[in-house]
Amino acid sequence: MIEYNGYMGTVEYDAEAKLFHGDVLNTRDVITFQGTTVEEIETAFRASIDDYLDWCRKDGVEPERPYSGRFNVRLSPDLHRRIAVAAKKQRMSINSFVEKAVADKVAALW
């Protein structure tokens, strides 16, 4: 994985074509890049992100940002209730409680 300006890309190697190709992962917009060396693929990745941002500016379109920090999660009513009670016992908001629980789980996996 490579990262630039908050955008993350994945790179694969096509042995038959002798070419690296990649896609930006954290946007619904399609952004791709390619190169024949590691240096070329890194440069192409950054150039693709810059081109995307330039295109958005020129067309007056708001670029899709990789992560807003917000996402919706659907829970069973029972789990929702248990989270609310646990958060209250900890004197935390539900949001803070869930954020900490998720952060702890992710940290354990990395």
Image (spheres, rainbow, N blue to C red):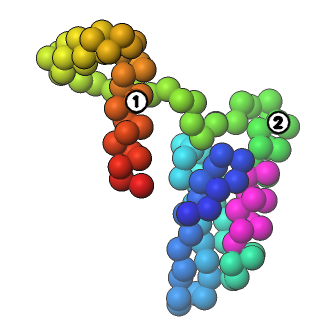
Q: Where is residue 58 drawn, in percent x and y? A: 85, 37
Q: Residues within 10 Å of mark 2 (few under 14, many from 20)?
A: few
- Mark 1: which amino acid? Lys
Contact, mark 2 vs mark 1 (Cβ under 8 Å) = no
Q: Residue at x 41, y 47 (%)?
A: 107
Q: Which of 26 and 17 lies nearest the eye of the viewer?
A: 26
Relative to 102, 30 lies left or right: right
Q: Position of residue 78 (x, y in %)?
A: 14, 17
Question: Which residue is at a point 34% across and 42% down the rendered structure image?
Answer: 105
| Name of the residue lying farthest toward the left | 78
Quarter assignment of residue 55 = top right
Quarter the C terminus occupies:
bottom left
The kind of secondary structure the magenta stretch mainly shows is helix
Residue at mark 1: 100
The magenta span reads 41-50
Residue furthest out toward the front: 90
SS at mark 1 in the image:
helix
Residue 12 image offset from top left, x and y in percent: 53, 74
- Where is mark 2, residue-wise? 57
Name the side, left or right, on which 74 lies relative to 76.
right
Outermost residue on the right side: it is 58
Residue 44 image-quadrant placement: bottom right
Question: Could you give the CA–CA distance between mark 2 and mark 1, rounded to whole angstroms?
Answer: 36 Å
Q: Amino acid at mark 2?
A: Arg
The mark found on residue 80 in the picture is: none
- Which mark is nearer the camera, 2 or 1? 1
Q: Earlier in the sequence, mark 2 or mark 1?
A: 2
Residue 41 % position (x, y) = 69, 72
Work out whether residue 100 or residue 70 is closer to the camera in this orientation and state it: 100
